[in-house]
Image (cartoon, grey):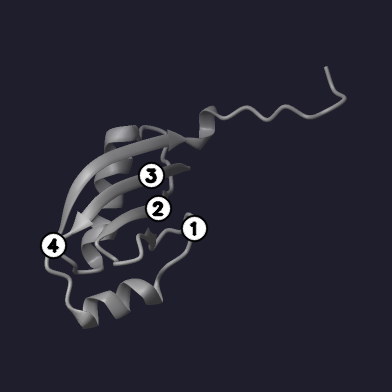
Amino acid sequence: MFRVTIRGKFKGLDDAGRAAVLAVSGAAYTEAGAFTHDHSVSAFTFRCQVPAGPDDDEDDAALRAMVALDVHGHAYEILQVAVTDMRDIKIRRKGRR
């Protein structure tokens, strides 16, 4: 599983677009993606969870997250993309060595 965070700015978001972004706002990583945004809904962070196949890498995950962002249909400018491969995350449990 990959978690992709895309930071960007909306370009020409109208009232209907603003309402659509507010409807899918949230801080969770989901396969459809969720937005967090500034008060004016001009800058955003898009969080997307992308399933990982055995041969998938971070570039594949970033491209699939951008496709999920495009599905929302809002014009945007990307400022930064960060990808975390959850397969590499190690969990340390308290009290175990």
Question: Quick one: SS at disc 3?
Answer: strand
Say if 82 sits above or below 67 in the image: above
Mark 1–mark 3 distance (CA, rounded to whole Å): 12 Å
Label whose residue precedes the other's in the sequence (4 or 2) = 4
Q: Which residue is mark 1?
A: 27
Picture quadrant of residue 59: top left
Q: Which amino acid does the dot numbered 4 rest on?
A: Lys
Counting the numbered discs, the total is 4
| Mark 1 burial class by Cα count in 10 Å: few <14, some 14-19, many 20+ | some
In front: label 4 or label 1: 4
Q: Which residue is mark 2?
A: 47
In front: label 4 or label 2: 4
Label whose residue precedes the other's in the sequence (3 or 4) = 3
Question: Quick one: SS at disc 1?
Answer: loop
In front: label 2 or label 1: 1
Mark 3–mark 2 distance (CA, rounded to whole Å): 6 Å
Is mark 3 in CB contact (under 8 Å) with mark 2? yes
Label whose residue precedes the other's in the sequence (4 or 1) = 4
68 sits to left or right of 85: left
Of residue 4 and residue 14, the one placed in the foreground of this image is: 14
| Mark 2 burial class by Cα count in 10 Å: few <14, some 14-19, many 20+ | many
Label whose residue precedes the other's in the sequence (2 or 1) = 1
Mark 2–mark 1 distance (CA, rounded to whole Å): 7 Å
- Checking the image for residue 11, the label placed there is 4
